[in-house]
Amino acid sequence: MKKRYLLIAALLSLTLVYPASNYFTSSDEVVSPYIPMTKADKLEVAFASWSEGHESNGGDHNVVMSLGWSKGLSDELTYAKGKAKLDLIEGFVEVEVEDLDDVGISEVWLVDNLNDSSVLPEPEDNFLHVGTLTAEGDRGTLRADVGNAFGTFEVDLLIVSRAGQDPVQSRVLVGSSSLMQRLYTRARSGRLAIGSEDPGGLSAAFGALGTQPVFASDLVPSFDPLIEQGADLFFNETFAGNGRTCGTCHPAEHNFTIDPEFIATLPDDDPLFVAEFVPALMSNFEKPELMRNVGLILENTDGFGDLANRFTMRSVPHTLALGNALTPGADGTTTPPDQRTGWSGDGAPGSGTLREFAIGAVTQHFPQTLNRTPNVDFRLPTDAELDAMEAFQLFLGRQDELDLSTLTLKNAVAARGQEVFVAADTVGGTVAAGKCNTCHFNAGANFSLTGGFENRNFNTGVEALPDQPADLIDPANNPPDGGFGQAPNPNGGFGDGSFNTPVIVEAADTGPFFHNNAIETVEGAVAFYNSDAFNNSPIGQFLASVDTGGIGIDLETTQVVAIGAFLRVINALENNRSATETATFVKDVDDFATANSLLELAFAEVEDAIGVLDGGGLHPKAVKDLKAAQISLEIAAITGIPFFRDLFIDIAVDFIADADADMV
């Protein structure tokens, strides 16, 4: 260790002769750090896994998409919802809609979006009228044979319109498929461009399934430029709106989320604050006091028909490890969505896919006026842009789940926290009853009792907590949040009271916690599950019913601290993994500005690791090593000679490895 510090001193003396910058620099273009990191292997694995599952369910003989009201595409609000099943090979379409309160909502259309100006159906697009729903009470059904139409027709949208109107004139129910489905179908049907290369190793992925795609035309490039384009859109594209981008609320430098501490660092003219200086957005667009003091963003999750009264105030979820949290469970709340997005698990419009999430986000947060008229107050993304942004979001963060059964922590308190976290009943004769692993299997977002990886919604009683910060600060502007769905909730708001289970490996440095930012610390979030609000909730009662001792959650104060320590350590380990990955990429980067931005992100990850460990009084030796790693990263950032820069990166990575060795 002492030799390593001497090496730093020696190299620093050489570095100062050829300085390249004054530590970290800032840039208006925040996409650059991700360009060299857009390696296809992350999505290769995800695509191969998805394809295998798709094949086992019938492949393109069985393409299922949900239908629902779409924020941004639907031109009227409806509570009807449904499913469509497409056989893209034999040419059949089946549609079933329930809660249909108007028989005039009847015409089923497929849209092949040929106009690259917007995902919104336009006269230049290709439309296929599938048929008319047959109404039976509040249920509508259709089965139609479209022959060989799918040979040349790519299904971008499925729309149910009003009788006598096409998708340009009427859009009530909307659905579409995910990025993986779109890529799979394009590859299978020979419509996927590759130039001279196989996009993202798709041939190998298909070869593992015993099939082989034929690549042709120019519809989709490989994963690498797709992710790169998505990053550029995510951070820099305003969609002709009020100046906001996706990165406004999901900044890379703050773990893709915002909180009051971060918000306080922003200048008053930051696009986040448009409701404070754009006259057309000063009423019913945001609640500035709740944004600045609690970090809550206004969402019209149940339609734009009553802006003054029908809204919710929600925190900003981070966008890390999304691929591990999208698969919906068979819990009766999946028609739609097809994927879990947002705090209530139905955050995306239409069929509820991550690809469509951007449509609702742009419509909700980007308009110049509250009329929210597409192509006037903003423009909607194109199909290609939606694909790219989904690819980028799937690329972010870790791709794999932890395996807690193989994780051995060295800190006794954190190790005990891990035991309590996974406990179903008792550990070592002491009541533990953590049961955390039931809903957060392997500290992820998936429900474990079914034996599969599926993300579910639960009513945990968070809304029943007294003295929530938003209620104390501005109760008049913090109405009850009903969670999933749009039906009136007897406790106020609209929905069934359930919310989506988030991943928690990244929890310790992405607080405050829950959909309402009600709890500030990770230990406070753990302690919530001891509360009457939780134990009297539907999921609290369920956990008590499956417990051999009839215990819901019953944690001693020391056990709350122990679980908090466990969550802090696994968060720090993930910070270190990300920092190492990011810093290592720099060694292949020639452009100084890009390398500098990457090193800044790596530095921020190490800073987060230090913060979560220090916050729990954990691993002082690891903290010391991480601070040394930061020094090395800072020196690397001012080094004008790539050879010496890379040496300092290697030293930083070694210090991070030493910190990991102290923890696990």
Image: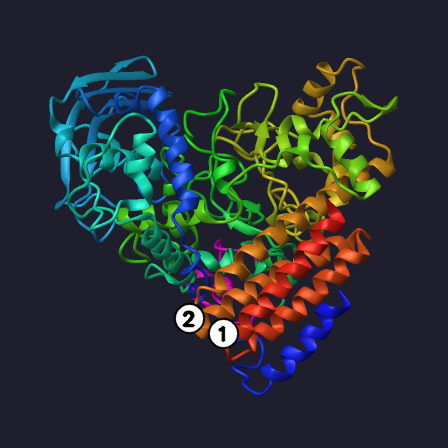
The quarter of the image holding the C terminus is top right
Task: State the image coordinates of residue 599 (x, y, percent, origin top left).
Answer: 55, 66
Classify 137 as above or below 275: above
Task: State the image coordinates of residue 127 (x, y, percent, origin top left).
Answer: 14, 35
The residue at 11%/21% (across/down) is: 147
Q: Amino acid at mark 1?
A: Pro
The residue at 70%/51% (across/down) is: 660
The quarter of the image holding the N terminus is bottom right
Q: Is residue 184 left or right of residue 308?
A: left
Residue 274 within the magenta-colored segment of the rendering = yes
Dot 2: few (<14), some (14–19), or many (≥20) neighbours within 10 Å?
few
**Circles 1 and 2 in contact, beta carbons < 8 Å:** yes
The nearer-to-camera label among 1 and 2 is 1
Badge 1 marks a residue whose secondary structure is helix
Extreme-bottom residue of the structure: 17
Q: Amino acid at mark 2?
A: Asp
Relative depth, front residue between 182 and 191: 191
Q: Is residue 298 left or right of residue 77?
A: right
**Which of the numbered marks, if any, corresponds to residue 590?**
2
The residue at 40%/28% (across/down) is: 79
Classify 122 as above or below 90: below
Q: Is residue 351 left or right of residue 572?
A: left
Residue 195 visible here: yes
Circle 1 residue: 642
Classify 201 as above or below 601: above
**Extent of the magenta region:** 266-287
Image quarter of residue 405? top right
Of mark 1 and mark 2, the one earlier in the sequence is 2
